[in-house]
Amino acid sequence: MKKKRIPWDQYFMLQAILVASRSTCERLSVGSVLVRNKRVIACGYNGSVSGDVHCIDEGCYMVDGHCQRTIHAEMNAILQCAKFGESTDDAEIYVTDFPCLQCTKMLLQAGIKTIKYLREYRNSKYAEALLKKGHVKVEKVQIEREQVDNLPFSEYLSFDK
């Protein structure tokens, strides 16, 4: 029997979920994957600035309900592109959670044309309006149980019993 290949949206979203596992935020783990022409150009997760302490080690540095240490996953992915000279124009992003207003504005300015997300998270009506005005395609991605069950992890992993 021929194996079914996982669809592109689920393939990239599962990568975003894996990237989120590197998050150093105590409150929410978020991962993002920037893609152009079915090729990953950058990944990002939410966490502290390089060289700073991590919230999982020192606790969150909260001011007005927001952690001051945290760089959002989308921003980290965009910054990776800036650091290594990769254009984000016309790219798409897969992110585990709907982008906040600040990330939405950044993604618009970076030329992202498609945002695919897994979970709703405090969706800003203004962010949604900006995305519509900017003609950015926004899609919620579903991952079905059988798509995960058919992944070949057992072929690559061995656990001592």
Image (cartoon, helix red, strand yellow):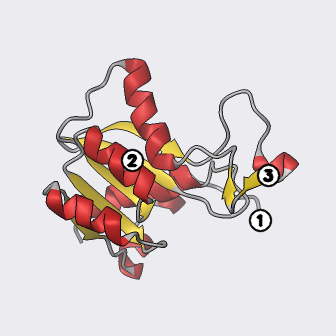
Figure quadrant of residue 160: bottom right
Label 1 – label 3 distance at C-alpha:
30 Å
Dot 1 and dot 2 residues touching (CB under 8 Å): no
Seen at 31% across and 70% down, the residue is: 141
Give residue 124's mark: none
Give residue 161's mark: 1
For the residue marked with disc 2, what is the amino acid? Val
Please identify the residue farthest to the bottom as the structure is shown.
145
**x and y percentages locating residue 12 in the rendered image:** 34, 54
Please identify the residue farthest to the front as the structure is shown.
64
**x and y percentages locating residue 68 in the rendered image:** 68, 46
The residue that label 2 is drawn on is 33
Establish if 89 lies above or below 59: above
Q: Counting other residues with Cα less than 10 Å from the Cα at mark 1, is it few (<14), some (14-19), or many (20 or more)?
A: few
Callout 2: SS = strand
Quarter of the image for the C terminus: give it.
bottom right
Give residue 56's mark: 3
Callout 3: SS = helix
